[in-house]
Every structure is written in structure tokens, then in C-alpha cells.
Amino acid sequence: MSISGTDAYARESRLPPLVVRALAAARTHGFAHSCRPEQGRLLQVLAGGAKSAIAETGTGCGVGLAWLATGARAGVRLVSVERDPVRARVAAEVFSDRAEVEVMVGDWWRIAERAPYDLVVLDGGGVGKIPEDEPADPARLLTPGGRVVIDDFTPAAEDPPRHDGRPDLPRLHWLRHPALRTIEIPLAEDLATLVGTRRWPE
Ligand SMILES: C[S@@+](CC[C@H](N)C(=O)[O-])C[C@H]1O[C@@H](n2cnc3c(N)ncnc32)[C@H](O)[C@@H]1O
């Protein structure tokens, strides 16, 4: 979660029209936690590699989803799930003229209803950063070679990474996941993302 993600766009120009639309919705509804532009541009690039389907957990007001939809080629389906019904409705309005985009209301695991995907972005549920949030199963959600993206880490200062003086178990879960090959990508001084590719069966 990016604390000031929506505000980070104040210095940005030349944004894709769909991102501008989603940002306007986020600002109107006072939603501060949109993904940052650095993350959005990464999502746009990764979406371009998807062959048929993309999913996101935690739609917010649709800014990350707008980057994904902008990068995806024609014919690719996009599904995003948001548990806050007001945000889900706001995001659904942003994409009302985009038949390929579906915004679902509910808990993150609803993305499993349309699995598998070529790209899964975990931005609200399924990450495992808090005890009551079970991490998503990449083998269930991703096609072989498919990618998972987990946003909003601070760049690791040591190896193995630590958080509050202890091993950073949620980050290590993804970095060492046996079904994935995962790396940490620094996007800014204070922001890093994990990107994992599902291994092919041997
Ligand atoms: C960081 S914000 C998402 C930002 C959005 N992806 C974007 O790029 O603009 C996290 C969102 O996830 C939603 N959320 C949190 N836990 C969830 C869960 N278990 N299932 C579905 N949505 C969840 C929150 O309501 C919040 O809107």
C-alpha cells in the first residue's frame, strides 16, 4: 500500500487517459492509497506480456487497474476485486466503457473464480503481510510462466531482508516460494516491488 500514492501524481504529466480518469475518481472520493506512478508504469509494461487474462486484488478507485488496462493488448480480460463496496462502484464507473474490465466486490480470493491468469497483482489481500491474510497460491492462480507482482516494500537493506529487527517473513515467503522465481525490483529510493514468475513443470 502506498501511503501517498494518489498525491504522488501531482508532479506527473503525460499520463494515459484511463489513468487520468481513475485518478480523478480517487481524488473526488478522497482515496489516498493508489499505486504510485513508478509502480503503475511497471504494471503497464508487464500487462503487455499477458496473453489472455490479468487479475488484481485491491482495486481501490482503479488507478493500478487503469495502468494494467492501458498496457494490455486487445482481447485480454482484466479482473479486479475490492472489498469496499463504495470503492468497487467508483472503480466500476471508471471502466464502464471497457467491456474487457470486470470489477468484483468481495474478498480477494474471488479472483480464483476466473483463474488462471498470466499476471496477478496483489495490492489488497493475498499478500500475507498481516496474520489474518493468507498468501495467495501462485500454482492455483497463474499459468506456468505467469507473473505475480507484490507492491509496496521498502528496498531491502540487507540479505536476508529484515523488518523491525526481525526476518521479513512476508517478503521471504515470496522471494523463496518454491513455485516461483522471484526478484525484488527497486522503483524509487523508498519503494520496491517483488516480481515472481511461476516455474514451468519439470
Ligand atoms: C493499496 S489500495 C489499492 C490501490 C489500487 N490497487 C491502485 O493501484 O490504485 C488497497 C485496497 O485493497 C482493498 N483491500 C484490502 N484488503 C482486501 C481484501 N482482503 N480483499 C479485497 N480488497 C481488499 C482496500 O479496501 C483498498 O481499497
Image (tube, rainbow, N blue to C red):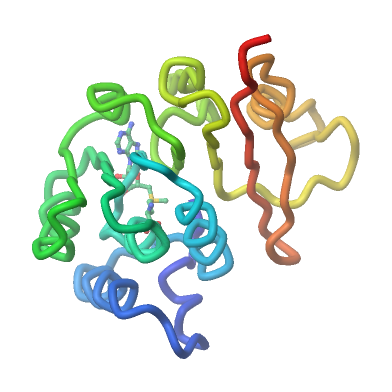
Image quadrant holding the C terminus, namely top right
Q: Is 87 drawn above or below residue 187 in the view shown?
A: above
Q: Residue at x 50, y 76 (%)?
A: 8
Q: Is residue 106 left or right of residue 9?
A: left
Q: Is residue 56 left or right of residue 139?
A: left
Q: Quadrant of residue 160?
A: top right
Q: Nearer the viewer, residue 42 or 192?
A: 42
Q: Quadrant of residue 17?
A: bottom left
Q: Quadrant of residue 92?
A: bottom left
Residue 189 visible, this angle: yes
Q: Is residue 179 left or right of residue 51?
A: right
Q: Residue at x 72, y 29 (%)?
A: 175
Q: Nearer the viewer, residue 146 or 104?
A: 146
Q: Nearer the viewer, residue 178 or 152?
A: 178
Residue 137 location (% of width, % of height): 48, 18
Q: Residue at x 73, y 44 (%)?
A: 184
Residue 182 location (% of width, % of height): 70, 33
